[in-house]
Amino acid sequence: LSSPMLTTSTTAPLGRLVQRGPAQHSSLGRSTRSGGPQAHVAVPAAISQETYLPLGHVATADIATGSLGTLLAAVLAASAAFWVWFLTRKPRDTQARCLAFASGAAQPQQHNVMLAASAQIVETELSTTSRCPPGGCPDPGEEREIRPGVFEGCWMWQGHRIRYQRAGEDGPAILLVHGFGANADHFRNNIDELAETGKVWAIDLLGYGYSDKPIPDKINPNTVYNFENWGQQLRDFITEIVQQKTFVITNSVGGVAGMQAAIDGPELVAGVVLMDVSLRMLHETKQSPLARPLVTQFQRLLRTTNAGKYFFDNLATPETLRSVLQQAYSDPDAVTDELIECLLSPGMTPGAVAVFLDFISYSTGPLPEDQLPQLKCPVRIIWGEEDPWELVEWGRDFQKFDCVEDFISLPGVGHCPMDEAPELVNPLLQEFVLKHQERSTELEQRVAADAAVAP
């Protein structure tokens, strides 16, 4: 997810598949850069036709829309309107009481005392690390079967517990990387079917799902939760757990982390699939000069005062999450109670609030348009045409990069195609993996043959 909804997950058996017919997905837009042998995967008739899309345009730097940008713009406007209304409707002599209440104080004269106490509490929290709750994931090095053929395990990384799921016994390696506020369970409709093609892992990034959530520095944000660290986490997971070259399949901000892993460790990544990759519209380079200081101050306010926890608590409800997801998903029926539980439960674990507030303050770091020119592996881009956060016409501009071999748009699908339309997405993922696995095998065989006949 790109929407700043909470970290979340569940370990209960899950397996709903959304059924869509050709009437809903009568065509699938596909723009292909290069040909190559076709993998032997049955693609549903509803998406077998190819149409070639013109290059679109990318958003200009001062557009204040998109995933996190839209939310923070709305919050800024709503907050400003609320406080103007709230303070102006009160008598002047009670405004201090109102401001004290907003910071957690009970009486105006206690304002400074309460601020100091609040700061002390936050400083105490910064010295701790939130651990997986009991039952959230197995002990390090152990695995348990959560449904037939799918196992859940815990991997220790830099002293932190990282939850993962795996399925499949042989074949090419596939690593599934979720978006902001999501976790490995967001791929519950994909991992079983992909296991028919190869060995599959889905991972909870540090700070999400049932992985540990070290408390970040509220004054110097994004020193823990950033794409360089997550890219390192993915590379180390491939090296230590997967132990072979891997296809990295991603959604939303997971795409930025996945590309960073491929840039920093090209020998580890066989290919990348980006599904509605986050365009990071809250990035400082995409904010107008006028908005930039306002956004920065609002981010700091959320991180360093009780306003952030209040904000989070109001978002962390089934009703609010359902409303947000029904915007992100084109089909409101795809937003089930199962999905809400999957995405909400770990958001209630210790540390989730701090991770949430740290990430919505992340306005620096890599951008996908800067990462794509650096990739040495093939890239397939899949995009839901009804994505309200990352508009498809912006994504189409990525076709211009040499590493992007095709861009496939999915009519009637929103921001999370793998969950909303797995019957369309899974064959596309299998086709990409098998095609490039065959090419890799052929290349290895040619190299071996050349070496055998060399003098």
Image (cartoon, rainbow, N blue to C red):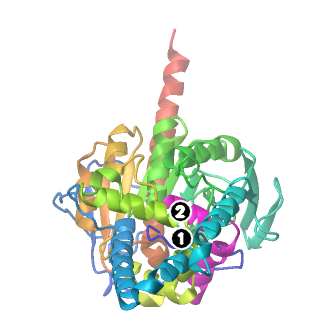
* Residue kind at label 2, given as amino acid type: Arg
Q: Which of marks 2 and 1 is nearer the N terminus?
A: 2
Q: Mark 2 points at which residue?
A: 303
Category of crowding for the residue at label 2, using alpha-carbon neighbours closer than 10 angstroms: few (below 14), some (14–19), many (at least 20): many
Which numbered dot is residue 308?
A: 1
Q: Position of residue 124 (x, y in %)?
A: 72, 58
Q: State left or right for residue 452 relative to residue 136.
A: left
**Is any part of residue 281 visible from this angle?**
no
Q: Nearer the viewer, residue 307 or 262?
A: 307
**Residue 56 % position (x, y):** 18, 60
| Of the pair 349 and 152, the residue shown nearer to us | 349
- The Cα–Cα distance between marks 2 and 1, rounded to whole angstroms, is 6 Å
Segment tinted magenta in the rendering: 337-360
Residue type beneath disc 1: Gly
Q: Do the residues labelled 2 and 1 touch (CB within 8 Å)?
A: yes
Question: Residue 287: percent from the left, percent from the top?
Answer: 28, 57
440 lies left or right of 15: left
| Residue 78 drawn above or below residue 66 | below
